Amino acid sequence: MPTFPSRRLAALITGASLVVLAGCGGSSDSDSGGSPSQSPAAASAIPVVTSTNVYGDIVGQIGGTKVDVTSIISDPDQDPHSYEANTQNQLALSKAKVVVENGGGYDDFVDRMLKSGNSSAEVVNAVRISGKTAPKGGELNEHVWYDFPTVSKIADSIAAALGKADPDDAAGFTRNAEAFKAKLQPLEAKEAQIKKDHGGEAVAITEPVPLYMIEASGLKNATPAEFSEAIEEGSDVSPKVLQATLALFSAKKVEALVYNAQTSGPQTEKAEAAAKAAGIPVVPVTETLPSGKDYLGWMTSNVDALAGALDK
């Protein structure tokens, strides 16, 4: 638990979109069609803006009531890759002392707005912290929040940034980050157990979102790269590539399909239907926090679902 007193805030309904909790401390959320909801927070709370509620939750766990978090993307139906920032986002960023972005091309709108507003905020860039780069001839997998060693490093960087903004509470931020990192260890242990039980087994994906979890679990991604890249970029999959992907299920060459439920479409739905028709378990994942979950609970559910599918 955070060293500082923490409090949970009620979720905000904006139209038909559910905006989920950004963190344990004071927070506000905004989505593509709504206004930020400003929650009560101490006047001295550090204004923090995060690109998604994934990082908003982590900031809240480390900062407690000492932070006032605005997560720009919080709608579980919103595809972060296609998000279009607005003037409310710009205003929030202009007031922020700390900004947490994913980087790696995932949320470039944050950098553009920071530059246009001449922001002096301390910026935590998750991909840069991870040290991950694109493989030779391949694409960078920017979904680093599915990589628990990277999340541990991000927690340290968030604590350092908050400590710089509020030196008097720096020691508390560090303690909270250490407590958060300790709770990541059981997740890594779960991945190690999957690797022990199922190492080398093949799975399919619709997008690279869960790849770091899959790789840490010792599993092989058998999906044609052209399929998952096309789905991520929002382009059509060729009939040949789609046929090869569907054949993974009809021929039972994979043990599970790990499916990004947040950006489903006709071609991914065909993959899901083919998996189910072949009796192959489907493991849904998302890019932002589901309603009622914090980061640790969410990732625990993901890893447990993967293990459960492979154990069938």
Image (cartoon, helix red, strand yellow):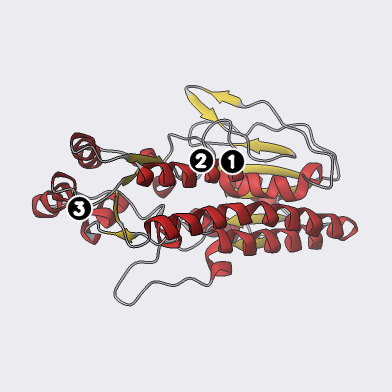
Task: Give the x, y percent position of residue 255.
Answer: 28, 49
Helix, strand or loop under label 3: loop
Q: Earlier in the sequence, mark 2 or mark 3?
A: 3
How much space separates mark 1 and mark 3, taking CA atoms?
A: 31 Å
Q: Nearer the viewer, residue 277 or 271?
A: 277
Check if mark 1's residue and mark 2's residue have beta carbons within 8 Å: yes
Q: Amino acid at mark 2?
A: Ser
Look at the image and tell me whether residue 105 can be seen. Answer: no
Helix, strand or loop under label 1: helix
Look at the image and tell me whether residue 137 can be seen. Answer: yes
How many numbered marks have been drawn onto this rendered protein structure?
3
Report which residue position mark 3 lands on: 253
Report which residue position mark 1 lands on: 297
Task: Give the x, y percent position of residue 91.
Answer: 64, 45
Q: Nearer the viewer, mark 2 or mark 3?
A: 3
Helix, strand or loop under label 2: helix
Quadrant for the N terminus in the image: top right
Task: Give the x, y percent position of residue 156.
Answer: 70, 63
Left or right? Give the position of 136 relative to 226: right
Image quadrant where residue 7 sits: top right
Mark 1: few, some, or many residues within 10 Å (few <14, many ≥20)?
A: few
Q: Earlier in the sequence, mark 1 or mark 3?
A: 3
Q: Amino acid at mark 3?
A: Lys
Q: Nearer the viewer, mark 1 or mark 3?
A: 3
Left or right? Give the position of 197 relative to 280: right
Q: Nearer the viewer, residue 71 or 238?
A: 238
Number of the label disc, if any, that sits on residue 301: 2
